[in-house]
Structure formats: C-alpha cells, structure tokens
Image (spheres, rainbow, N blue to C red):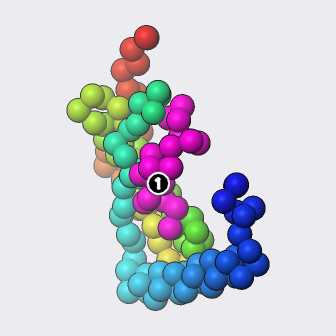
Amino acid sequence: MEIGRGLSAIDYHELLESRRAFTGRMRALMSDIDLLLLPGIGAASPTISQMENLGSDAELFAGVTIPTAPIDNCGMPSITLPAGFTERGTPLAAQFVAGDFKEGLLLAAGHTFQQATDFHRQHPHIVAV
C-alpha cells in the first residue's frame, strides 16, 4: 500500500496500461486453451514463522503470490484446490484457470479433479510447538 501511495498519476496510468496489455495477451492465449494448470502458491507451503513475515518480506510475498497474482490481476476465472503434500507433510495446491465466461468448465474440471483424488479429504499432521 505504501508503494501505491507514492505513485504519481503518470506512473499509475502506466501501470493500468500495462495491466490492460497483459490482460489482452492472457485473453488471446486462453482463446486456444480450455484450461491452464498452475501451482496454487509459488513457495512450497511456507512455515508459520515465514508467514508471520509475509507483510514485511517482499521476496516471500512475491514467491507466494507469483502463480496467482497475474491471474487475479487480469480477472481470469480460476479455482485453487488441494493437490498434494510436501515431503514434510504440508499441503500443496493446484490452480485451474479458464478463459472468460468458462466458469462452468472450470468448476466441472475442479469437481472431476476432486472425484479422482482425495487431497481435499486429507489434513496435514499438525505438530504442537
């Protein structure tokens, strides 16, 4: 938020134009793709202590949001579902992305994924510290 407050009107306008251009490229890409599968997070299940620093650690914030931020930014429909566990037993997620007005396909794919897997029924083992 602090960075946004420091932007000039020209800088803000340039950011909006960049966003519009990116959104246009994503729409063009998705015109030939039914679904795109991406990681749900850019870092394999950060620890609680890492997440406590999320707001002040720009590198961690970028690492965590890399797969989802571009999709959120361009407004593409997406759904993130449990998709496995790391070696230490923490959850992983998969992000399904569809083109504009393909929410029905997206939800059907998510449902099919959950019928074929049981990740959404499993829970990580929590160790008290």
x and y, in percent, of residue 27 in the image: 50, 84
Residue found at x 36% / y 64%: 37
Whether residue 80 can be seen here: no
- Relative to 30, residue 64 above or below: above
Residue 84, by quadrant, is top left
Looking at the image, is 65 positioned above or below residue 129? below
* Location of residue 90 by image quarter: top left
In front: 81, or 43?
A: 43
- Circle 1 sits on which residue? 62
Q: Can residue 106 be seen in this view?
A: yes
Helix, strand or loop for disc 1: helix
Q: What stretch is highlighted in magenta?
A: 51-70
Say few, some or many: other residues with alpha carbon within 10 Å of mark 1 (under 14 / 14 to 19 / 20 or more): some
Nearer to the camera, 120 or 116? 120
5 lies left or right of 82:
right
Q: Where is residue 80 in the image (x, y as percent from the top left)?
A: 47, 53
- Residue under the point 27% across and 28% down: 88
Q: Does the magenta stretch include residue 117?
A: no
